[in-house]
Image (cartoon, rainbow, N blue to C red):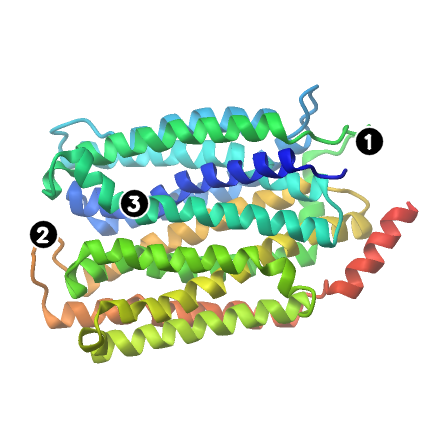
Amino acid sequence: MKLTFRNKFGFGLGAIGKDIVYMLVSSYLLYYYNVVLGVSSAFIGTVLMLARVFDAINDPIMGIIVAKTKTKFGRFRPWIFAGTVLNAVTVYALFATPANMAESGLRVWLAVFYLAWGITYTMMDIPFWSLIPAVTEPGKEREGLSSLARSAAGIGDAIPTVLTMAIVPILSGGAVIANYTIGFKYWALIIAIFFVISETVCVLSVPERKIEETKSVGIMEMFASLFKNDQALVVVVAIIFVYAALNVVGNLILYFFQFDVGDTDAYSLFVSVCFGIQVVAMAVIPVIRRKVEKLRLFGVGIVVQIIGFAILLLMAVTGIYKTLGWLSLCLPGMLVYAGYGVLNVMLTVFLSDSVDYGEAKNGSREESVIFSMQTFTVKLASGFAVFAAGLAIDMIGLETSALVQSEAALSGLRLFMTIPSIILLVCGYLVFKKYYKLNDEKMAEIQAQLNRK
């Protein structure tokens, strides 16, 4: 189907809304429950990792349920809308903890509502991304829609990352951390309302192709088709490494600005610049692709990120940013987020291409089952990052209630927010380079084969 401006606008707005919610939880859940409410960072990380164990079963099953859905409104849109409404409720609940609740109660509250958040986010995220391979063919239109969606999602990522620490004190009535519970509650409510509006527009704006009648496929056959798709599995592994690399630093960088740089206002400006570059990098992918083969472009994104992390490590360890001014930190930040922007778009394209590959190889087309693995791995990377960040905070002896930290704690913070990310990126690149085979020529062959069918 030929996508119109209305279709693209609706899909882009939906990407903004869903990533605002995701980034609020991904970037600030640890800070909110640890620094604001005083819950153990190790406990928070453990809860998030245990939720990922549950997702390993829940997400593929949700993908299968979506794949078997047939309604007059389509296969994907009913789930996008229903999941959005339920998820909006849970994200508000996560940041609307009852006043004066003891830590034991806060732990139960976090565990219950974070699990509910993960389930309902899966309900809408899998069908949302499944729309890309469902309404496009390999090539310019698919890459264009992927670039648009990821650019819009980048804007969604930036909004809570940039604005949260500026808006929460205002909504709280002051800059006292003890009052941040009020600010986070109302900020989460605003985001939840926008989320519902944006996904409603998306659902009304993006029509689905008519579902063709095919033979019924059982649950076990769907699972089998997923694991027979070796290229989808390679992309999934790459997603884990790439997303975890950014999420580790994403969870620790606020601590770095608060306790090492000593300026949380600077953090907001820093991430504004970084996300701005990320959005630009994602938006220009279609132009770059005219001259650069997509597998090579993936490698470029990895290298740019690694260089950014290495410069950040050097500046943090030597303290040279204190001489140059904290704005100098924007240079490595821009490199990290520009590289991530490239990888983010290309991984979406690669996963979409693996849907066509699976159809050509196995005779079945399972968009939602394959994209359930993206949803799972993105949440897995986020959970791993929070778990690792929580352990790191405890290991280095960072006292979140203290204004001044020991030099040992600060040194540990600088190392943990950079070196693990470099290692993860190197591992992700090595796996991808060795096993991923769907270059431009191969995809042209696959599309020709599917067209003949």
Residue 401 numbered tag = 2
First along the sequence among labels 2 and 1: 1
The disc placed on residue 163 is 3
Q: Note whether residue 95 is visible.
A: no
User: Where residue 395 sits in the image (x, y, percent)?
Assistant: 20, 63
CA–CA distance in space, label 2 to label 1: 60 Å
Looking at this view, is 6 or 344 the one in front?
Answer: 6
As helix, strand or loop, the secondary structure at mark 1 comes to: loop
- How far from the left and from the top, in percent, is residue 139? 74, 54
Q: Does residue 38 appear to the left or right of 283 in the view shown?
A: left
Amino acid type at circle 3 is: Leu
Report the disc number at residue 214: 1
- Around disc 3, counting alpha carbons within 10 Å, would you say few (fewer than 14), some (14 to 19), or many (20 or more)? some
C-alpha gap between disc 3 and disc 2? 23 Å
The secondary structure type at the circle numbered 2 is loop
**Quadrant in the picture for the C terminus:** top right
Location of residue 332 (image quadrant): bottom left
